[in-house]
Amino acid sequence: MMPSDITGFYLYSTTGNSSFMPGPIFANLVLADELNRTTPRTQAALLEAMQDYQVTIERKTYPLERPLW
């Protein structure tokens, strides 16, 4: 599992436009199991979301809605 699978990603089109596709972490309730088996970057993305209530994608920070459980 990659961090973009959880946080979201930018979708770039052939016309040069980009749009942000939010991931499941932007929901108010996220259920995850066996987080210790994910990569360190994925764990860091999840910890940032849980501790700081924000997600950083391509140097841009997006706040998460509360409550986040």
Image (tube, rainbow, N blue to C red):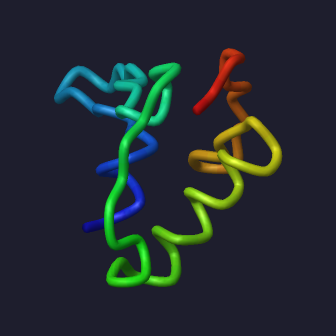
Report x, y in % for residue 41.
Answer: 51, 75
- Left or right? Give the position of 53 relative to 29: right
In the picture shown, does residue 46 fall above or below 13? below
Report x, y in % for residue 30.
Answer: 42, 36
Give whichever of 8, 65 is nearer the camera: 65
- Left or right? Give the position of 41 relative to 16: right
- Left or right? Give the position of 69 relative to 37: right
Report x, y in % for residue 56.
Answer: 66, 46
Q: Residue furthest toward the left?
A: 14
Q: Residue at x 46, y 26 (%)?
A: 29
User: Which image quarter holds the N terminus?
Assistant: bottom left
In the picture shown, does residue 33 fall above or below 17? below
Give the total of numbered labels.
Answer: 0
Give whichever of 61, 65 is nearer the camera: 65
The image quadrant that residue 44 belongs to is bottom right
Q: Residue at x 45, y 43 (%)?
A: 7
Q: Residue at x 36, y 53 (%)?
A: 32
Report x, y in % for residue 46.
Answer: 56, 57
In the picture shown, does residue 43 fall above or below 16? below
Q: Residue at x 37, y 33 (%)?
A: 23
- Left or right? Give the position of 19 relative to 69: left
User: Which image quarter holds the C terminus?
Assistant: top right
